[in-house]
């Protein structure tokens, strides 16, 4: 049985998923939580958002072909390729995460082929790892998901405590958020919240709120030049801009309230 809160962050590409994930990871770590941040996006940018140089960022597990073949027991017979749908992976986080000092970073990577829901050893391996970290680990887990909606078909985030969609002022990001939220609810995830990011005008917040369907707006984050510069310089985004961090922390508090209201549980300390 897991004990720590499990959160996943999704949305259209470029909206700010990785930014939210890294700042929240730091906020939870500052409160004393044992935080495991998982990069499940094929674009692999969570390490950079923590300010890690490229040569210190762990190689994604999805690229470890020999490990995946060993764990899934991949082989061929007269009918075709066979592999285990439920490979053993519970020992892998400890072996492969990078402890940054405050947060543990586990780089899974993601499926890059179209559709993402492929029945292949890599898909089974990723799904098993996500399921294991969500259902069995004690850390507070934050999953930085792949962009878009395709990966949701694999249902690998079932069991998450809350799903957060990030939107920017733009109708396509809102459409993606609404689709993701509906898919999350179909998976039985009851707490779904949104963050309106890169806001430059108050009217944008009202427009976003009116177009979101069945998603609680957790908070708004102003457009930040410093966040953009941090990305350009591969500097930790959590230290780049006090206002951005404060706005994201406020949204995090709203999410924690939502989680506790829904479960009747005491707030995680
Ligand atoms: N509030 C913000 N203000 C300005 N730039 C932002 C903000 N949030 C994110 N960004 C920038 O937008 C880009 C995409 O953000 P990122 O977090 O990588 O998005 P995603 O993970 O959704 O693709 C990055 O260059 C990031 O620094
Ligand atoms: Mg990202």
Image: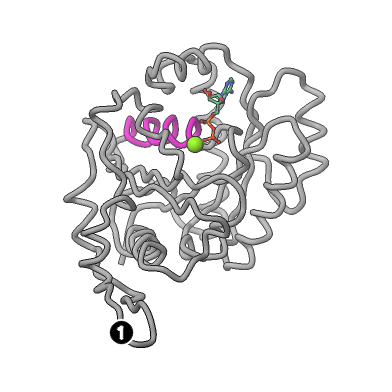
Is residue 1 shown left or right of residue 206? left
Q: Where is residue 175 in the image (x, y as percent from the top left)?
A: 75, 46
Determine the secondary structure under disc 1.
Answer: loop
Q: Position of residue 238 (x, y in %)?
A: 42, 23
Q: Nearer the viewer, residue 181 or 92?
A: 92
Residue at left 30%, top 40%? 105
Image colouring:
one colour
The quadrant of the rendering that contains the C terminus is top left
Q: Main secondary structure of the magenta part?
A: helix
Q: Where is residue 141 in the image (x, y as percent from the top left)?
A: 37, 49
In the displayed structure, would residue 170 be above or below residue 257?
above
Per the image, the residue denoted by label 1 is 77
Instruction: Give the magenta part as a residue range.
Output: 18-31
Q: Nearer the viewer, residue 264 or 189?
A: 189
In the displayed structure, would residue 257 be above or below residue 53?
below
Quarter of the image where one finds residue 79? bottom left
Residue at left 31%, top 45%? 60
């Amino acid at each position: 049985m897991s004990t720590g809160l499990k959160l996943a962050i999704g949305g259209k590409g470029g909206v700010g998923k990785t930014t939210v994930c890294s700042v929240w990871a730091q906020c939870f770590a500052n409160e004393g939580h044992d935080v495991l941040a998982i990069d499940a996006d094929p674009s692999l940018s969570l390490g950079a958002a923590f300010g890690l140089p490229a040569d210190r960022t762990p190689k994604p597990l999805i690229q470890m072909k020999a490990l995946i073949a060993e764990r899934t027991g991949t082989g061929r017979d007269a009918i075709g390729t066979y592999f285990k749908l439920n490979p053993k992976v519970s020992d892998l986080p400890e072996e492969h995460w990078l402890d940054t000092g405050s947060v543990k970073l586990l780089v899974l990577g993601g499926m890059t082929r179209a559709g993402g829901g492929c029945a292949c050893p890599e898909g089974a391996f990723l799904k098993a790892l996500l399921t294991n970290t969500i259902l069995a680990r004690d850390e507070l887990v934050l999953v930085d998901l792949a962009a878009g909606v395709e990966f949701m078909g694999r249902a690998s985030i079932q069991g998450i405590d809350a799903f957060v969609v990030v939107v920017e002022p733009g109708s396509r990001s809102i459409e993606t958020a609404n689709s993701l939220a509906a898919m999350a609810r179909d998976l039985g995830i009851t707490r779904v919240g949104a963050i309106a990011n890169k806001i430059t005008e108050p009217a944008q917040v009202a427009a976003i709120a009116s177009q979101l369907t069945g998603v609680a707006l957790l908070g708004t984050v102003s457009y930040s030049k410093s966040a953009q510069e941090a990305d350009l310089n591969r500097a930790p985004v959590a230290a780049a801009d006090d206002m951005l961090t404060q706005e994201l922390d406020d949204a995090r508090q709203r999410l924690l309230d939502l989680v506790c209201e829904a479960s009747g549980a005491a707030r995680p300390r």
